[in-house]
Amino acid sequence: MPTTTTQLTTTYASEDYEGDVEDYEEDAIGATTTSTTIGPTDGPGSVPPGTGSLQCYRLASDFPPSGQWVSLQTLIDTSRPDMVGSSNDGPDEADAVIAAVQSVSVSAGLDPRIGFAMIMQETSGNVRPIVGDGGKSYGLLQAQIPGIPLCNDYAKNECPKEVITSQVEFGFFGHAGTGSPVAPGIAYWVGAQDDDVGRALRGYNTGSVPDPNDLTQAGGATSSYVSDVANRLTGALVGAEHQATCS
C-alpha cells in the first residue's frame, strides 16, 4: 500500500543529498507541508536500477502500470549523482529540482514519478539545458513556451529555486491545454487521456496522439519517447543515460 509522505515546499539546508526523502524533510528551513501519496517501495515488476533489459513499449496496452514502477526515492537516488555530475547542476540546484517536482506534482494531481522521469529524459535534470527543437523548447521539460525563466545567466549552484520551480510548473501545466503557443503540460495530457500515462506522454512529446494504440507513431517527434520514459519508470534506464528503446 502507498503511504503518505510529507511534501516540502521550501529550500534545504543540506549541501548534498545522501539519504532519503525524510532527510530532505529534516533539513528543511521553515518548511510548510502538504501531503502526497507516492509508492514508498519499488513495484514488483520493476528491476534493480540499471540492471534490467530495456523494453520496447510500443503499444499503449504494453505500457507498464504504476505498480511496476520503481519508487520516487529510487528515481532520486539513481538520478541525483548525474544531475550534479554530467548534467553540471550545483547540489542546491539539484535539490531544488527534486523539491519542485514533489511540490508541483501535488498541485497538478500528478504522480511525481512521471514528472521526474520526464525531466531526466528531456534534460537529464540539467537546469541549464540548450534550447531544443530548433530554438523552440525551453527549460527542464523542454516546453515550447517562450519566456520560461531560465538559469543560464546564473552561476552554477546560484539559480534561484523560484526559477527552477517555474520551469517545472510550465512543463506540468503548460497553457492548460490552450493559449498561444498551444503547449499543454503533462498534467493536461494525463487528464485528457483519462489517466493513460503512455498516451499522455505521446501527447506531450508530439502535441497530439496520432495513433492511440501504437505509441511509436510520433508525427515527426521522438518515436521512442514513451518507451524511453517507461524504461525510466521501471528502473531499466537510469540517470543521464539515454538510449532509444524503440526503433
Image (cartoon, rainbow, N blue to C red):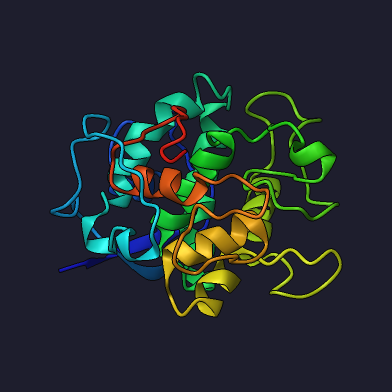
Q: Is residue 31 left or right of residue 133?
A: left
Count of marks placed on residues: 0
Residue 120 x/y as whole percent: 49, 39
Viewer can see residue 85: yes
Q: Is residue 200 left or right of residue 158?
A: left
Q: What residue is at 28 percent from the left and 47 percent from the top? A: 234
Which image quadrant is residue 80 in? top left
Residue closest to the far top: 86
Q: What residue is at 36 percent from the left and 51 percent from the top? A: 57
Residue 60 x/y as whole percent: 39, 64
Q: What residue is at 59 percent from the left and 63 percent from the top? A: 203
Residue 188 x/y as whole percent: 59, 73
Establish if 62 lies above or below 129. below
Which quadrant of the figure contains the N terminus? bottom left
Viewer can see residue 30: no
Establish if 52 lies above or below 156. below
Residue 24 x/y as whole percent: 38, 45
Establish if 63 lies above or below 158. below
Establish if 120 lies above or below 91. below
Q: What residue is at 85 percent from the left and 52 percent from the top? A: 147
Which image quadrant is residue 182 in? bottom right
Question: Of 244 and 135, which appears nearest the observer?
Answer: 244
